[in-house]
Image (cartoon, grey):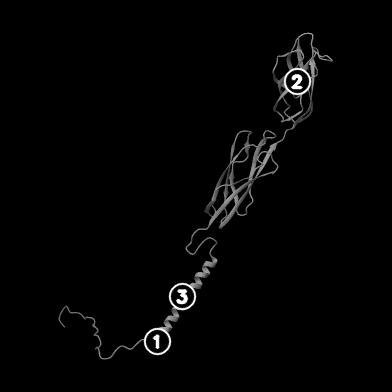
Amino acid sequence: MAAGEGIQPAVPTAPPSNPGIPAPPSSPRRTARYAGIGAVVAAIVAVVLLGLAGVLPLGINALGAQPTVTVHSATLTFEPASNPCFPSEYGGGRAHTLATGGVIDFTINLTDQSDGSVRACTVVSVNVSTPGFTVESSNVPLFVALGVPAELHVSVEVPDSAYQGNLSMTANVTFQRPNVDVTAQNFSYSPSSDSGPCGVDAASGVAFQTFAGSQYDDSAGFFVISPEVSWTLTAVATTTPGFSVVSASTPVFLPIDSFGGVSFVLAVPSQAYTGNVSIVLTLTE
C-alpha cells in the first residue's frame, strides 16, 4: 500500500441485470387493500371534523370567525307610562352589528311634552330588559327643562355570545305636579265700601294651580257703574301669608259705565298650599 493511501469504503456494485426477465405485475388484492385503507382514513377525518364543528360556539365556523351580535332595532319606553313628560316610545333607528362583548352607544333627543302641566321632568335611571345586555353608562340624572331639548346618552354592552334580535330599554322618570292650589280669590277695595267707593262692583278672579316657589300671572275684572267722580286703581296687594304681588299694571283709570281690569304677578309660597287668597285693590280719587 502506497503512503498516503487510506482504506477507502467499498463501492457496491449493481447486481447483473437480466433484461430477459420482466418485472412481476402488481397484485390486484394489494391495490384494493390500499384503496380501502384510504376510505377509512377519510371517514375518520370527516367524523373528527364533524365532532369539532359540534363543540364550536354559536357563530364561530371551522375557520375560527368571531361571533357577532346584531341588534335589528332598539326601543326606549318610559316609566311610569302615564308620565306627561315623555309619553311616547322612542324606537327604530339603524341596525347594529358588532363583535360579542362590544358596546353600542345610543343618543336619544328628549323634549318635555307636558305643556307646563308638570315641571322638573328628569330621567333618573336607564335599564335594559333584554337578557344578556347591560347598561355600561348613561348621563343620568338628566333634567329636561320645558322648551329646552336635551340629549340622553346610553352605552349598552352586548352579550358575550352570538345574538340576533331586538333590544328593549326602560327609562325611569320623575316630575313635580302642581302643589299650590288656590281654590278662590277674594277681592276687596281700599278705601272699603259696600258698593265700592267709586261705583265699582266686586272684582272677580279665577282659581288656579301652580308650583311652589313660582310666580303666577293673575288678573281681576270689575264693572265701573256711574261714579260721581273719576277714580284710579293705583295698587294691588295681598294679605294672605306666603303670597306677594311682584308687579301690577297700575295705574288703571276707571272709565264710567264700562268694564275695567288689572293684571298682576302673584308670587306663591315656597311650600305646598291649598286655600283661598285675599287681594286688596287700592283706589285713588
Q: Which residue is mark 1?
A: 28
Mark closer to the observer (2, 1): 2
Residue type at mark 1 is Pro
Q: Position of residue 183 (x, y in %)?
A: 79, 28
In percent of width and height, residue 143 lies at 63, 36
Q: Nearer the viewer, mark 3 or mark 2?
A: 2
> Which corner quadrant holds the C terminus?
top right
Where is residue 118, by image quadrant?
top right
In which quarter of the view is residue 3 placed? bottom left
Dots 2 and 1: beta carbons under 8 Å? no
Position of 218 with respect to 143 (left or right) is right
Image position of 280 with respect to 61: above or below: above
Q: Residues within 10 Å of mark 2 (few under 14, many from 20)?
A: some
Tell me if residue 266 comes above or below residue 169 in the rendering: above
In the rendered structure, which disc, 2 or 1, sits on the residue that comes first in sequence? 1
Quickly name the residue at label 2: 221
Assess disc 1: are there few (<14), some (14-19) or many (≥20) residues with their C-alpha within 10 Å of its C-alpha: few
**Helix, strand or loop for disc 3:** helix
Residue that sits furthest to the left in the current view: 2
Q: Which residue is mark 3?
A: 42
